Image (cartoon, rainbow, N blue to C red):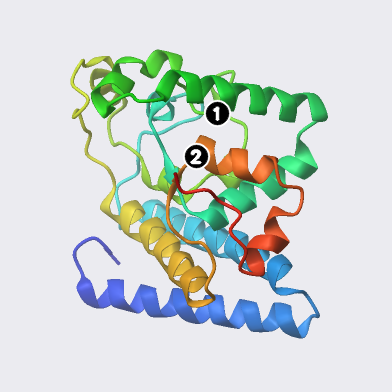
Amino acid sequence: MNMSNQPDQESEFKEILFQTIQEKLSQKKADGLKFHDAILLVFQEVLEFSDSIVQNLEENGQSPKVACRSGCNYCCHSQVNIIPIEALLISAFIKTDFTFTEVSALNAEISQIHLLTAGKTLEQLYALKDDLPCLFLKKGKCSIYKMRPSICRSWNSFDSVACKAAYDSADYRSSIIGSPARNFIFGTTRALFGQLSEAFSLQSETLLLPNAMSDCLNNADSISQWAKGYDVFRYE
């Protein structure tokens, strides 16, 4: 199954994913979970489900394998946009797996990022990329890899040399060729959860990752408030 050039199979995947989400939400409700607990668990499970599909496609030769490997982090110096539910999933992970010292360091890094990026154009930000690694890039690796946003799962390359060339380029429009299958699968996953959030009148529009994390980390009850329809995230 080559999902990049077969519209019928793309439509089939969307339907399967939508049904999977509905079934998992119904099961969590039957198990007695509240919505704000259920929705995050379902989102995590569906991300894992999408990961397994990508892995199967690549292992079976139905989609080319990417060159991305642990320690390669050229793309981890970009301005990343995420949707609220992604920020909340990361936040839940941080609250259970990060120490108080690590959380304090994250807040300090967010403040520094705001100082560096305020009023900058995209071109100016690109010139500062060495000083603006992802908030969660630690010792060359992603510290939230299991909970990383959909866009990080989508961003990929078939050629690490091309990644380095794009990174070293002074042109902020530099790009690489990525996997259509990964882009479609994880893009669809994020889109469906964005639509689900919107259907429940929950905040769903994209935010820059540091801004979204700042809102989560400074609100001890961000998950339940968001699930009740309160405005947890600031769109400024």
First in sequence: mark 1 or mark 2?
A: 1
For the point 65% across and 84% down, the residue is: 26
- The label on residue 209 is 2
**Mark 1 → mark 2, Cα distance in angstroms:** 8 Å
Asked if one can make out residue 162 in the rendered structure from this viewpoint, the answer is: no
Q: Which residue is drawn at 63% across and 62% down?
A: 226
Give the x, y percent position of residue 109. 59, 22
For residue 14, above or below residue 178: below
**Residue 122 position by quadrant:** top left
Q: In which quarter of the image is the C terminus?
A: top left
Nearest the viewer among 78 and 163 is 78
Q: Position of residue 8 (x, y in %)?
A: 24, 78
Instruction: Tell me if I can see residue 148 in this picture.
Output: yes
Q: Residues within 10 Å of mark 2 (few under 14, many from 20)?
A: many
**SS assignment at label 1:** loop
Position of 61 with respect to 6 (left or right) is right
Q: What residue type is labelled 2?
A: Leu
Quarter occupied by the N terminus? bottom left
Question: Is residue 150 or residue 158 the one in the foreground?
Answer: 150
Residue under pointer 1: 135
Say few, some or many: other residues with alpha carbon within 10 Å of mark 1 (under 14 / 14 to 19 / 20 or more).
some
Q: Which of 48 and 115 is in front in this view?
A: 115
Pointers 1 and 2 in contact (C-beta within 8 Å): yes
Q: Which residue lies furthest to the front in this view?
A: 236
Amino acid of disc 1: Leu
Secondary element at image label 2: helix
Say left or right for 136 vs 174.
Answer: right
Q: Quadrant of residue 106?
A: top right
